Amino acid sequence: MASITLKGNPVNTSGTLPEAGTAAKDFKFVRNDLSEVSLNTFAGKKKVLNIFPSVDTGTCAASVRRFNQEASKLDNTVVLNISADLPFAQARFCGAEGIKNCETVSTFRSSFGKDWGVQIMDSPLAGLLSRAVVTLSADNKVLYVEQVSEIVNEPNYEAALASLK
């Protein structure tokens, strides 16, 4: 279990993220059109997993915008913005913001939060995902892991993106 904070107050997650150098666990997400995707959907591509509580918060929205901006500069890379938001809310946000260089995917109908150790177990955000970034190689090895210790803070974009170069 990871111990993080929400505005300085302790919060616990369902586990810990995978370690760098290990094989990524499979996952299942729901796209904005309600189709399902898994790790195999993105076979042969490097992946940025931008994990966060909700696209309807300022910090989460900022991370989606930043990774969208940076995604167009990366070769053979897909950015997955992952939250428990319903696909409809994600689609609305992306349409309003002009997000086109990355995908938003929902953990709706998924055990991803528990499987990857990022489900928040207590606090007012219980049931949502913690803020984390994981990068994966084209062959699904974990390259970089960041569990953001304070939920309201942004991740280390530069370190995450550097792991893919």
Image (spheres, rainbow, N blue to C red):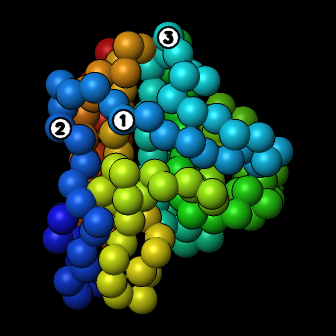
- Circle 3 packing at 10 Å, graded few (<14), some (14-19), many (20+), is few
Q: Which amino acid does label 3 sit on?
A: Gly
**Does residue 90 appear anywhere in the picture?**
yes
Q: What residue type is labelled 2?
A: Glu
| Viewport quadrant of the C terminus | top left
Which of the two discs, 1 and 2, labels the residue nearer the N terminus?
A: 2
Q: Which amino acid does label 1 sit on?
A: Lys
Give x and y (percent) for residue 107.
57, 55
Marks 3/2: CA–CA distance: 21 Å
The residue tagged 2 is: 19
Q: Which residue is drawn at 79% across and 60% down?
A: 88
Q: Is residue 122 left or right of residue 69?
A: left
Seen in the picture, residue 56 relative to 67 is either above or below; the reply is: below
Seen in the picture, residue 154 relative to 127 is either above or below; the reply is: above
Give x and y (percent) for residue 33.
82, 45
In the image, 64 versus 50, the foreground residue is 50
Q: Which residue is drawn at 34% across and 50% down?
A: 116
Seen in the picture, residue 65 relative to 41 is either above or below; the reply is: below
Residue at disc 2, secondary structure = loop
Give x and y (percent) for residue 2.
18, 64
Asked whether the residues under the numbered discs 3 and 2 touch, taking CB atoms below 8 Å apart as contact, a structural biologist would say: no
